[in-house]
């Protein structure tokens, strides 16, 4: 049995999609894993409440309480590592986690640290991806699940999903369309990885 630790900063809909998929009758038992904890850098992240209601352990490591990135990342790693099982390192899943991580943190979790980004990488790394796709006149947008490396929104791509950009789209309507695909591809990638690692 492996533990999955999910890091969030906001509404946590990707986290919820992963938790719900793990509980589905046709998936339960096949994962050989459970979502052991949800950790947020923001005390008011909406997803924390939902995770609590599901009986999942939650923790807050508030970045504002730390003097610098390195100190925050050290505290975050200590929080994550509390949910590791002896001899079985946890998969660490960034799901709308909006902090840049230090190279030391990334190196510590290399090979088990995943992210989802709301664009078809390598296009539109960084913020405001949907508006930038609209402004660029893209006909398709989407989301990417990738291994995390020290470069921002970079790293080997594990899965992508594309959606059309419609003429009447705002950043919000496009984001909502992309999000529905995020909720499909992220659990699928995790299930595939759990079979291999
Ligand atoms: C998602 O669209 C995710 O791809 C994005 O934040 C949203 C979080 O939604 N992540 C990033 O922008 C990371 N660079 P959620 O909290 O409802 O899962």
Image (tube, grey):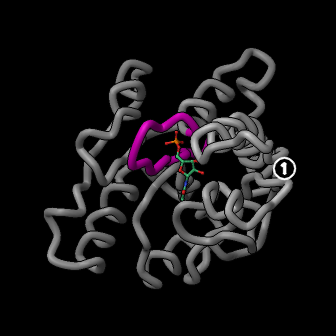
Measured as percent of width and height from the top left, residue 154 is found at: 66, 76
Q: Residue at x 55, y 46 (%)?
A: 4
- Image location (x, y in percent) of residue 163: 82, 45
| Residue situated furthest top in the rendering | 25
Q: Is residue 195 visible?
A: no
* Residue 68 picture location, percent across and down: 22, 79
Can you say whether 45 is above or below 108 in the image?
Answer: above
* Residue 3 appears left or right of 141: left
Left or right side of 46 for 189: right
Residue 75 image point, x, y percent: 26, 65
Give the secondary structure at mark 1. Answer: strand
Quick one: 92 or 81, which is closer to the camera? 92
From what the image shows, is residue 11 above or below residue 42?
above
Q: In terms of image quadrants, where is residue 62?
A: bottom left
- The answer, for residue 79, to whether it is visible in the render is yes
The mark tally for this picture is 1
Q: Quadrant of residue 69 in the image? A: bottom left
Up the image or down, 189 lies above or below 63; here it is: above
Residue 29 location, quadrant? top right
Is 10 in the magenta?
yes
At a point 49% along the width and 47% down the height, the residue shown is: 6
**Magenta span covers which residues?**
1-14
Q: Tell me which residue sits at (33%, 40%) in the image.
A: 45
**Figure quadrant of the N terminus:** top right
Instruction: Pick the quarter of the image with the C terminus.
Output: bottom right
Determine the residue positioned at 52% across, 80% down: 107
Residue denoted by label 1? 162
Task: Answer with left or right where residue 187 lies relative to residue 81.
Answer: right
Viewer-closest of 18 and 107: 18
8 shown above or below 106 = above
Q: Is mark 1 within 8 Å of ligand 1?
A: no
């Amino acid at each position: 049995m492996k533990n999955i630790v999910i890091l969030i900063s906001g509404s946590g809909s990707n986290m919820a999609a992963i938790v719900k998929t793990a509980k589905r009758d046709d998936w339960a038992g096949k994962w050989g894993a459970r979502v052991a904890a949800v950790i947020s850098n923001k005390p008011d992240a909406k997803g924390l409440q939902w995770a609590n209601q599901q009986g999942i352990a939650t923790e807050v490591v508030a970045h504002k309480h730390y003097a610098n990135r390195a100190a925050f990342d050290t505290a975050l790693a200590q929080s994550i590592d509390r949910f590791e099982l002896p001899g079985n390192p946890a998969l660490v899943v960034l799901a709308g986690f909006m902090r840049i991580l230090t190279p030391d943190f990334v190196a510590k979790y290399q090979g088990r640290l995943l992210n989802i980004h709301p664009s078809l990488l390598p296009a539109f790394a960084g913020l405001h991806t949907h508006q930038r796709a609209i402004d660029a006149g893209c006909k398709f947008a989407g989301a990417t699940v990738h291994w995390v490396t020290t470069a921002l929104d970079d790293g080997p791509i594990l899965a992508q999903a594309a959606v059309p950009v419609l003429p009447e789209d705002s950043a919000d309507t496009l984001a909502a369309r992309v999000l529905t695909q995020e909720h499909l591809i992220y659990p699928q990638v995790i299930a595939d990885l759990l079979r291999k690692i």
